[in-house]
Image (cartoon, grey):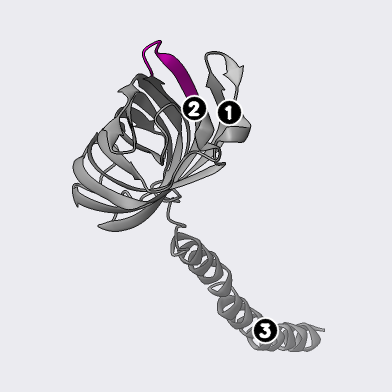
Amino acid sequence: MRSRLVSLLAFAAVVTVLVFPASATAQSLKLPDSPSFLVSGMAANQQQPTTPATSTEGGIGFGIKGGWLYSSFSQAGESLGSKGGWEAGIFFGGNRGGVVGVMGELLYAKKSFEEGVVARKTDLDYLEIPVLLRINLGSNNKNKGVIFYALAGPVFDINLQAKQDGIDVSDDYEKLDIGILGGAGLEISRIILEARYNWGLKNLLKNESISLSGGDLKNQSFALIGGIRFN
C-alpha cells in the first residue's frame, strides 16, 4: 500500500515537473507580446504626421473701388466745357503678393461736357473695362504691409447711354471707345489710393451733325480713386 502511494506521488511529481514548467514557459513567451503590441501601437499613433493648416493667403485678389472722375473733351482741336463725374466698380487680380500681375476691372463711369453759347450739356454713361499690367513694389503682406504699384494697359469703354439736355441721343454716339490707361497707387494693408489717366483714341461721334463744333470728338479723363481689397 505504502509502495503504491510512493509510486503515485513520484509519478505526480514527474508530471508536475514536466507539464507546468512547459506551460509557464509558454505563458512567459506569450506575455511580452501583448505589452509590446500596446507600446508599439501607442508609438505608431504618436508618430502620425499632423496635417498642416490650410493657408488662407492665396486666391485671386478682389475688391471694390471708386472715386472722382474729371473728363476732358476736345473737338476740332478745341477743348469743350468739361465737367466732373464719378466712377465705381470692382477689380480682380493684380498679384498682390508678387512683383508683376494682371488686373481687370469693371467700372461704371459717368462723364459729361458742355458746348455752345447756350451750354448744351451732354451726359455719357460708360461701362469701363481696363485690362492692366500691375507692377508692385513693397511688402507682400496684404494685411499689414505697404505697397506702391504702377498700372498700364488698354481700356475698353462701352457706351451705355448718351443724353443731350435730357434727350436720348445714344444712336448718335459710337458704342465702343478704346483708350490707353496709366496710373499709380498706394496700398496700405487693404486700403487703396490711386490716380490714373485715360487717353481715348477713337472718335466718339457716329453722327457729327449733332455737335456744334464738327469734327472728331475725343475724351481724356483723370480719376482719383479709393478702394478696399477683400482678398
The residue that label 2 is drawn on is: 124
Give whichever of discs 1 and 3 has the lower sequence position.
3
Q: Position of residue 166 (x, y in %)?
A: 56, 13
Q: Earlier in the sequence, mark 1 or mark 2?
A: 2
Q: Which image quadrant for residue 75? A: top left
Q: Is residue 11 left or right of residue 31?
A: right
Residue behind mark 3 = 13
Residue contact between numbered discs 1 and 3, judged by CB atoms under 8 Å: no
- Front residue (pair 37, 61): 61
Q: Which residues are magenta?
A: 116-123
> Is residue 95 at all visible to an observer of this figure?
no
Direction from residue 188 to residue 7 in the image, left or right:
right
Residue, disc 1? 161
Towards the viewer: 68 or 157: 157
Asked whether the residues under the numbered discs 1 and 2 touch, taking CB atoms below 8 Å apart as contact, a structural biologist would say yes
Pointer 3 local density, CA inside 10 Å: few below 14, some 14–19, many at least 20: few
Amino acid type, callout 2: Leu
Place of residue 213 in the rendered image (x, y in percent of width and height, measured from the top left): 39, 30
Spot occupied by residue 84 in the image (x, y as percentages of width and height): 34, 19
Q: Is residue 36 left or right of residue 58?
A: right
Tell which of 131 and 168 is nearer to you. 168
- When the figure is inspected, residue 124 is found, relative to residue 177, above or below; the finding is above
Real-space CA distance between mark 1 and mark 3, rounded to the nearest whole angstrom: 115 Å
**Callout 3, which amino acid?**
Ala
Q: Is residue 153 visible?
A: yes
